[in-house]
C-alpha cells in the first residue's frame, strides 16, 4: 500500500468520525493501524488530528515526510476493518442460534412458571388448612433459619432519584468476600433531557483547507449539521434566529450574519482583523473587537448592518478584547488598565470602566440570559477552567466551577439559563460538556470531532489569537 493510499484511508476514517459513525476510540485505533516501517526500518505514523506524518527517532516522534511511496502494513487497512466491523458468521448461523436460544428460553420459562404455580397451589392449601385448624394448639413452631456466613441478602433496588445529577460520575460499588449484606449499587446520574442546538467551531487541518467551520448539534436528536464553512466564533441573536460569526473566507473576511430561517448571509463589516461578535440585548447591533495593524491594540467597536461606530455611551473606541453585552446594557470586555488586567464593565456615559475581576488571563465572558451572572474562562490557577461571577456584586471572589486537569473553556448558557455548556479535552479529545451554574451535574454531551486550534492559511497569524477567542452558542 502506498503512502498516498494510507493518507486516503486516514481521510476516510476522519470523515466517519465527523459524521458521528464512529467514536473517538475507533478513530484513533484506525489511525494507529496506518503505522508502517520504511525500507530503512524507521517507523512512521499519522497524527490523530493533524493528519501529518511523524517518524520515531531517538525515542520520540518527530515531524517528517516519508521518502518512499510504498508502506508495509502489519494489519488490515482501517477502512476495511471499519467497513467490515459488522461482518461475522453468516446470517443463517445467527438465525439458527437465535431460534435455539429462543426455544431454550421458552422451555425454561415454562418450567419456571409450572414450578411457581405448584408452589402457589401448595401454599394456598397450607393456608386454607391453617385457617380451618386455627383453634388447635400449634406444635413445635419452626423459626426461620438464620443466614449462614455464605448467604447474602439481595441488594435493594434504589428508587429513581429526583435530585440533581452528581458533579462527577460515580463508580459502581463492588461486594467484598466479607459475610453480610451486599453493598447497594450506586447508579450514575442520568443525562438530562436537553433541548435546542449548540453551535460550535471545528478546525479542519486538511492541508487543502486549513480553516474553521461552524457545526450545530441538535440536542434532542443527536443530529449534527454543518452550518457555515470557513467561519468560527458563533453568536446567536436574542431571539435565536440570526447567527453572527467571524468569516475566515479570504474573499469575504469580517463579521457576517446568517439568517437561520432563510439562509441569507449579509456581511456587516468586511475587514480581516475583526473578532468575537456579540449581540446587543435588543438584537439591533453587534459588538466586536478590531485591530488596525500588527502593532496596534485591539479595540472595542459596535456596528449595525449599515454603520460602524464607538461602543454605546462612549465618545471613542475603547482598547480591549472579547466583548460581550450584558442584559442590563453594560459591556464586559477584557483589558489592562493602569497596570491591572482582568474583565471590566462599561456603564453610564462618562464613568470610568468598572473592574469585575483581577485575573490577568481572565477572558471569554458569557452573560446569563436573564442577567446577574457572568461565566468566563481563566488559567489563574495554572489551568484553564470555568468560573462564575455575580455581576451585581463584582467584589466577591469568582466561583470556580471546573477542577479537572484538562483544558476547559468557551462557556455558553442554555436559553433558559439553567445550564452551562463548555468545551473540554478531559477525555484526551475536545468534547462539549454541560453543568449547572453552580458546577454540579457535569456530563459529556458529544465529541467536537476535531481540534479547536489552528492557523487559517489565508490570513496573517497576528489576527489569529488562538482557541481562547473561540465561542460556542446555545439556541432554541
Image (cartoon, rainbow, N blue to C red):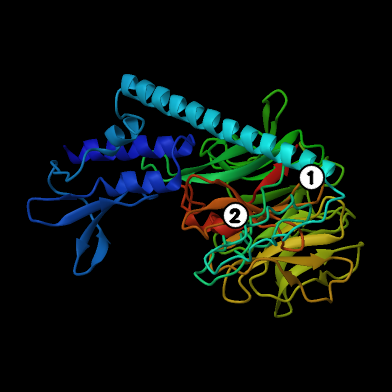
| Residue lying at 68% horizontally and 62% vertically, measured from the top left | 167
Are there few (<14), some (14-19), or many (20+) residues within 10 Å of tag 2? Answer: many
Residue at the spot of label 2: 423
Visible in this render: residue 285? yes
* Residue 394: mark: none
Visible in this render: residue 268? no
Q: Earlier in the sequence, mark 1 or mark 2?
A: 1
| Residue lying at 56% horizontally and 63% vertically, measured from the top left | 151
Observer-nearest of 104 and 85: 104
How far apart marks 1 and 2 lie (CA) works out to: 69 Å
Q: Position of residue 444 (x, y in %)?
A: 60, 52
* Labels 1, 2: front one: 1
Label 2: state its secondary structure: strand
Observer-nearest of 446 and 248: 446
Q: Is residue 144 left or right of residue 30?
A: right
Q: Is residue 184 left or right of residue 323?
A: left
Q: Dots 1 and 2: beta carbons under 8 Å? A: no
| Residue lying at 60% horizontally and 64% vertically, measured from the top left | 182
Observer-nearest of 177 and 233: 177
- In which quadrant will I find the N terminus? top left
Q: Is residue 118 above or below residue 287?
A: above
* Residue 130: mark: 1
Amino acid at each position: 500500500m502506498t503512502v498516498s493510499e494510507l493518507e486516503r484511508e486516514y481521510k476516510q476514517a476522519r470523515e466517519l468520525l465527523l459524521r458521528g459513525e464512529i467514536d473517538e476510540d475507533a478513530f484513533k485505533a484506525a489511525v494507529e493501524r496506518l503505522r508502517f516501517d520504511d525500507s530503512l526500518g524507521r517507523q512512521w505514523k499519522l497524527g490523530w488530528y493533524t493528519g501529518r506524518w511523524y517518524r520515531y527517532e531517538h525515542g520520540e516522534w518527530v515531524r517528517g515526510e516519508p521518502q518512499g511511496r510504498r508502506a508495509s502494513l502489519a494489519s488490515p487497512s482501517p477502512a476495511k476493518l471499519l467497513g467490515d466491523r459488522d461482518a461475522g458468521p453468516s446470517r443463517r448461523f445467527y438465525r439458527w442460534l437465535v431460534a435455539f436460544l429462543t426455544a431454550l428460553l421458552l422451555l425454561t420459562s415454562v418450567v419456571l412458571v409450572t414450578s411457581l404455580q405448584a408452589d402457589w397451589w401448595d401454599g394456598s392449601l397450607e393456608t386454607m388448612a391453617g385457617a380451618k385448624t386455627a383453634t388447635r394448639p400449634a406444635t413445635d413452631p419452626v423459626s426461620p433459619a438464620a443466614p449462614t456466613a455464605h448467604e447474602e441478602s439481595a441488594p435493594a433496588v434504589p428508587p429513581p432519584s429526583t435530585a440533581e445529577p452528581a458533579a462527577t460520575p460515580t463508580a459502581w460499588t463492588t461486594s467484598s468476600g466479607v459475610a453480610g449484606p451486599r453493598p447497594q449499587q450506586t447508579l450514575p446520574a442520568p443525562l438530562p433531557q436537553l433541548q435546542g442546538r449548540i453551535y460550535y467551531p471545528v478546525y479542519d487541518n486538511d492541508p487543502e483547507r486549513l480553516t474553521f467551520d461552524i457545526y450545530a448539534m441538535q440536542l434532542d436528536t443527536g443530529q449534527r449539521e454543518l452550518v457555515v464553512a470557513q467561519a468560527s466564533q458563533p453568536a446567536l441573536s436574542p431571539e435565536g434566529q440570526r447567527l453572527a460569526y467571524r468569516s475566515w473566507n479570504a474573499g469575504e473576511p469580517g463579521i457576517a450574519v446568517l439568517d437561520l430561517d432563510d439562509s441569507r448571509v449579509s456581511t456587516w463589516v468586511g475587514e480581516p482583523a475583526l473578532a468575537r461578535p456579540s449581540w446587543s440585548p435588543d438584537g439591533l447591533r453587534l459588538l466586536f473587537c478590531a485591530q488596525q495593524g500588527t502593532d496596534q491594540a485591539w479595540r472595542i467597536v459596535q456596528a449595525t448592518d449599515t454603520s460602524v461606530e464607538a461602543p454605546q455611551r462612549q465618545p471613542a473606541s475603547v482598547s480591549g478584547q472579547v466583548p460581550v453585552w450584558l442584559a442590563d446594557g453594560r459591556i464586559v470586555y477584557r483589558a489592562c488598565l493602569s497596570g491591572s488586567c482582568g474583565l471590566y464593565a462599561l456603564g453610564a456615559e462618562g464613568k470610568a470602566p468598572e473592574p469585575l475581576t483581577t485575573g490577568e488571563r481572565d477572558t471569554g465572558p458569557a452573560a446569563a440570559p436573564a442577567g446577574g451572572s457572568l461565566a468566563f474562562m481563566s488559567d489563574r490557577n495554572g489551568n484553564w477552567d470555568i468560573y462564575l461571577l455575580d455581576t451585581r456584586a463584582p467584589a466577591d471572589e469568582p466561583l470556580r466551577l471546573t477542577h479537572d486537569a484538562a483544558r476547559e473553556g468557551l462557556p455558553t448558557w442554555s436559553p433558559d439559563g439553567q445550564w452551562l455548556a463548555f468545551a473540554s479535552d478531559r477525555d484526551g479529545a475536545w468534547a462539549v460538556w454541560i453543568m449547572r451554574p453552580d458546577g454540579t451535574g457535569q456530563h459529556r454531551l458529544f465529541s467536537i470531532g476535531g481540534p479547536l486550534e489552528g492557523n487559517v492559511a489565508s490570513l496573517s497569524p497576528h489576527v489569529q489569537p488562538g482557541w481562547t477567542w473561540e465561542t460556542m452558542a446555545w439556541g432554541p
